[in-house]
Image (spheres, helix red, strand yellow):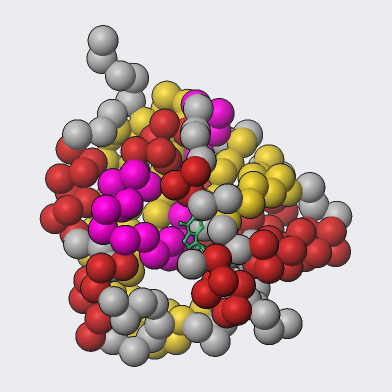
């Protein structure tokens, strides 16, 4: 897995461009007051750089050391201090540390998809916000990027079921066809699932 992503990130260019993901950008106000933010599966760092430039304290987790090396270099060029965590999300043990968690296009196998939501919520303080944009299973019918393996795509109803069992308020959960213009790797019409969750106090 790491080798696959490392190979993809070899080029000097940014696979998903330099601009932050639109969904993250459009919802920035929701996390503007956050002090600490974790970016999951952050790759070359387009969201991390954007959020760090806004003055937030950022940590970026990713499986690819090649992507994280590019992120670190980019951050240095902009005099930004971004914490790096090189690991698979499967090996990460989150504690309530962050005010926000963001995640764009982290392609996980079905068996690990619930873990993404569980860990994101575990990582948040109560009241913290999780924002994610993921390719839906319908993306298999589009050629704008993403895995060509349905096992790595997300099903809307699965996510609906997953979030029901988690300590969160659902601020948004939708499946949408959008126009992607993100670097060379996401171009054209695509089907995404957009999620915004707010962590609730766990009832004891
Ligand atoms: C499609 S790229 C998206 C990168 C970034 N989020 C963006 O939108 O620009 C997927 C990223 O997830 C990382 N990744 C894939 N599986 C992972 C895992 N199990 N744990 C941590 N990172 C993973 C890859 O290394 C890659 O950087």
Q: In this view, does 59 lie above or below 176?
A: above
Q: Where is residue 98 in the image (x, y as percent from the top left)?
A: 55, 33
Q: Which residue lies most toward the top here?
A: 204
Q: Position of residue 17 (x, y in %)?
A: 60, 77
Q: Position of residue 112 (x, y in %)?
A: 32, 51
Horizontal relation, residue 81 to residue 16: left or right? right
Residue 76 sits in quarter: bottom right
Q: Does the magenta stretch include residue 100?
A: yes
Residue 191 sits in quarter: bottom left
Question: Which segment did they paint magenta?
Answer: 96-117
Q: In this view, does 16 lie above or below 38?
A: below
- Is residue 43 visible from the viewing direction of this image? yes
Residue 203 sits in quarter: top left
Identified at 69% across, 49% down, the residue is 84
Between 27 and 158, the one nearer to me in the picture: 158
Quadrant containing the C terminus in the rendered view: top left
Q: Where is residue 94 in the image (x, y as percent from the top left)?
A: 49, 33
Q: In this view, does 91 lie above or below 67?
A: above
Identified at 36% across, 60% down, the residue is 108
Between 133 and 158, the one nearer to me in the picture: 158
Identified at 42% across, 31% down, the residue is 122
- Is residue 193 visible from the viewing direction of this image? no
Horizontal relation, residue 130 to residue 2: left or right? left
Total labels: the figure holds: 0
Q: Is residue 108 magenta?
A: yes
Horizontal relation, residue 24 to residue 190: left or right? right
Identified at 60% across, 79% down, the residue is 7
Q: In this view, does 162 lie above or below 10?
A: above
């Amino acid at each position: 897995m790491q080798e696959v992503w490392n190979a993809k990130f070899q080029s000097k260019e940014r696979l998903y461009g330099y601009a932050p993901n639109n969904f993250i950008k459009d919802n920035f106000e929701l996390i503007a007051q956050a002090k600490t933010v974790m970016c999951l599966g952050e790759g070359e760092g387009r969201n991390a750089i954007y959020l760090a430039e806004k003055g937030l304290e950022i940590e970026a987790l990713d499986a690819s050391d090649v992507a994280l090396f590019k992120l670190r270099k980019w951050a240095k060029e902009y005099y930004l201090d971004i914490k790096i965590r090189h690991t698979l999300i499967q090996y990460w043990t989150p504690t309530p540390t962050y005010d926000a968690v963001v995640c764009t296009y982290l392609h996980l196998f079905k068996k690990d998809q619930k873990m993404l939501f569980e860990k994101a919520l575990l990582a948040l303080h109560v009241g913290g916000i999780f924002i994610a944009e993921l390719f839906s299973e319908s993306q298999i019918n589009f050629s704008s990027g993403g895995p060509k393996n349905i096992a790595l795509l997300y099903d809307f109803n699965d996510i609906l079921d997953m979030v029901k069992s988690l300590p969160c308020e659902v601020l948004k959960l939708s499946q949408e066809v959008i126009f992607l213009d993100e670097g060379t790797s996401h171009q054209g019409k695509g089907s995404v699932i957009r999620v915004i969750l707010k962590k609730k106090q766990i009832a004891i």
